[in-house]
Image (cartoon, rainbow, N blue to C red):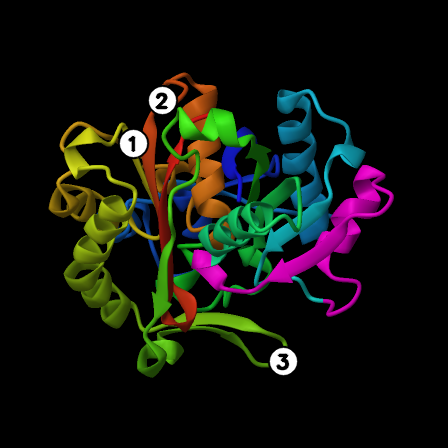
């Protein structure tokens, strides 16, 4: 078995920005109500001619360019999304076609807000088992397309975007002398709470039991996050960054404190981007790296949670 690492990151958001003041024209709400409850001030909104695979392809193209790779350097494309409308072709195949790839394996993973961390673990496993050498992992969602714009408790949360990572093999000699680029995953679910976050119906609409998710996240997630760190041999105070699913600032900030990551930069992209579901973790991580807030090689905890109620986390090294 070989090691793995993240070689590069990329992100993309649509140009249109919807502010809290804009939302007040659509539904009974205001800026103070939204910021006091979830901390969100703006979110990006894709147009009707911007499908999920286009968002994903933009983020992927940026990651490829950053890594100095061409599309055919990729042999597996994994896209985490829960908002692709069509069942076939899947989003990964459409991304591959947009990028001009010739023969990659292509798969979608629907684990909603924990989708990217599940996909990242799947890529890590595929490379370690010899099934792939270089994997394009994308989290992309168009949550505004499944929003109920009459429900002020949910429509104020959502935004659109995509984030991408390139996972590649590291030879045994290099891997032996370095900390793992992608640490062991801790993943699971709470099946009896599966209905707490939903995208269902015709047309599909996003709904959630907000208080149930909040209680679970604040009470159960800190111990799971600390266990994730243990699996990578990292103490929480050694973390340089914490990137949780960007669901709600009221969840993110207390969680980071409870994990014990006292020296870490905590991603707060939810303020500017809203809840972008599977895109939220790679989007937030890519921005931190692009701004130079996390140094190369630094350990960062990623932890996704949400629909099903599923969760997955790992410690990664900054490319």
Dot 3: within a 10 Å radius of its alpha carbon, few (fewer than 14), some, or many (20 or more) residues? few
Task: Return the residue nearer the eye: 297 or 302.
Answer: 297
Q: N-terminal of the two: label 3 or label 2?
A: 3
Total numbered labels:
3
Closest to the observer: 149 or 254? 254
N-terminal of the pair, mark 1 or mark 2, is 1
Residue 170 in view:
yes
Residue 193: % across, % down: 32, 78
Q: Which residue is mark 2?
A: 294
Q: Position of residue 303 (x, y in %)?
A: 34, 49
Residue at 52%, 47% in the rendered image: 124
- Kind of element beneath mark 1: strand
Q: Are marks 3 and 1 in contact (CB under 8 Å)?
A: no
Disc 1 vs disc 2: Cβ atoms closer than 8 Å? Answer: yes
**Disc assigned to residue 241:** 1
57 vs 187, left or right, is: right
Between the residue at mark 3 and the residue at mark 1, the CA separation in whole angstroms equals 40 Å
Residue visible at 32% across and 73% down in the picture: 209
Residue 2 in the figure: left or right of residue 221: right
Q: Secondary structure at mark 3?
A: loop
The image shows residue 91 at horizontal and vertical percentages of 71, 56
Label placed on residue 202 = 3
Query: In the rendered structure, does residue 109 fall within the stretch colored magenta?
Result: yes
Q: What span is colored magenta in the figure?
A: 86-114
- Place residue 293 in its image quadrant: top left
Among numbered discs 3 and 1, the one appearing first in the sequence: 3
Crowd tier of the residue under label 1, counting other residues whose Cα lies within 10 Å: few below 14, some 14–19, many 20 or above: many
- The image shows residue 242 at horizontal and vertical percentages of 29, 37
């Amino acid at each position: 078995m070989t090691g793995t690492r993240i070689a590069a990151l990329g992100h993309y958001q649509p140009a249109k920005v919807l502010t809290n003041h804009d939302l007040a024209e659509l539904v009974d709400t205001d800026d103070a109500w939204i910021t006091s409850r979830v901390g969100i001030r703006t979110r990006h909104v894709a147009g009707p001619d911007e499908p999920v695979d286009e968002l994903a392809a933009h983020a992927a193209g940026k990651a490829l360019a950053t890594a100095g790779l061409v599309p055919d350097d990729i042999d597996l494309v994994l896209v985490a999304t829960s908002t692709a409308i069509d069942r076939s072709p899947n989003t990964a195949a459409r991304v591959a076609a947009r990028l001009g790839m010739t023969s990659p394996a292509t798969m979608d993973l629907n684990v909603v807000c924990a989708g990217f961390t599940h996909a990242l673990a799947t890529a890590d496993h595929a490379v370690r088992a010899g099934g792939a050498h270089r994997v394009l992992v994308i989290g992309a969602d168009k949550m505004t397309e499944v929003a109920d714009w009459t429900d002020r408790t949910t429509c104020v949360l959502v935004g659109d975007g995509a984030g991408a990572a390139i996972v590649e093999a590291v030879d045994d000699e290099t891997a032996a002398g370095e900390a793992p680029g992608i640490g062991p995953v801790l993943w699971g679910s709470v099946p009896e709470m599966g209905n707490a976050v939903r995208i269902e119906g015709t047309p599909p609409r996003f709904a959630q039991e907000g208080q149930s998710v909040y209680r679970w996240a604040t009470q159960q997630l800190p111990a799971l996050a600390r266990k994730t760190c243990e699996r990578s041999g990292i103490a929480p105070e050694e973390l340089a960054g914490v990137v949780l699913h960007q669901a709600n600032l009221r969840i993110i900030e207390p969680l980071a404190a409870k994990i014990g990551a006292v020296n870490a930069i905590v991603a707060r992209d939810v303020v500017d981007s809203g809840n972008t579901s599977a895109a939220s973790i790679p989007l937030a991580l890519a921005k931190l790296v692009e701004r130079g807030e996390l140094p190369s090689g630094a350990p960062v905890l990623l932890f996704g949670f949400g629909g099903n109620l599923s969760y997955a986390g790992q410690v990664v090294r900054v490319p």
